[in-house]
Image: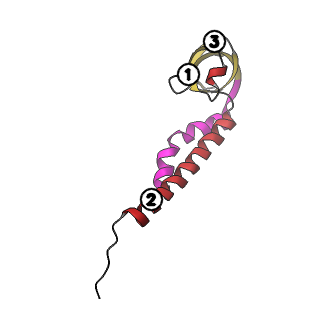
Amino acid sequence: MVAVFAIGIGSARLPRARKLASHGVVAQGHIVETNCGQHSTIQFQFVANGLVIAGHDSVANCSSVHSGDSLSVTYLPDAPDVNIAGSGTAHLHDETVGIAVGALFMSAFFLFGITYLVPRFSRNS
């Protein structure tokens, strides 16, 4: 039950990740700004359908990237505002692993709570 709850909460971003992995197009973009102090966020731009599109995402290596650096961007051709920095397939993998790990830890935490934190009642015979 707890695992189902964790999967339900964690899977809110999964449909977007699936669409990007299966229908996404890769374009070259460039980093406009980094904000490593705020969840390792970068802002980037790329061209899709002849228009300059702005996006933002979190990256693992924020301190090693700088404004002007190029990067790959995956976006949906019919909705370029749906985009991520990097590979759509890698993003889907990260989301799936995050959900699985979250479900595992929530289940373990729940079982720990049931086993050790709930007061035990004894019957007097």
Location of residue 63 (image quadrant): top right
Residue closest to the far left: 124
Query: Where does label 1 land, which residue?
Result: 36
What's the residue type where badge 3 is placed?
A: Ser
In-front residue for pair 81/61: 61
Does residue 50 appear anywhere in the picture?
yes
Tell whether 28 sits left or right of 80: right
Q: CA distance from mark 3 to mark 1?
A: 12 Å
Residue closest to the far bottom: 125
Q: Secondary structure at mark 1?
A: loop
Q: Is residue 93 above or below residue 106?
A: above
Q: Residue at x 67, y 31 (%)?
A: 24
Q: Is residue 9 magenta?
A: yes
Query: Where does label 2 land, which residue?
Result: 110
Labels 3, 1: front one: 1
Tell whether 72 sits left or right of 17: right
Q: Residue at x 51, y 45 (%)?
A: 10
Q: Is residue 117 above or below residue 20?
A: below
Q: Residue at x 64, y 36 (%)?
A: 91
Point out the tag, 3 or 2, that comes first from the N-terminus: 3
Does residue 82 appear anywhere in the picture?
no
User: Which span is picked out in magenta?
Assistant: 1-26
Q: Secondary structure at mark 2?
A: helix
Q: Is residue 21 magenta?
A: yes
What's the residue type where badge 2 is placed?
A: Phe
Location of residue 67 (image quadrant): top right
Residue 116 got which mark?
A: none
Point out the tag, 3 or 1, that comes first from the N-terminus: 1
Q: Secondary structure at mark 3?
A: loop
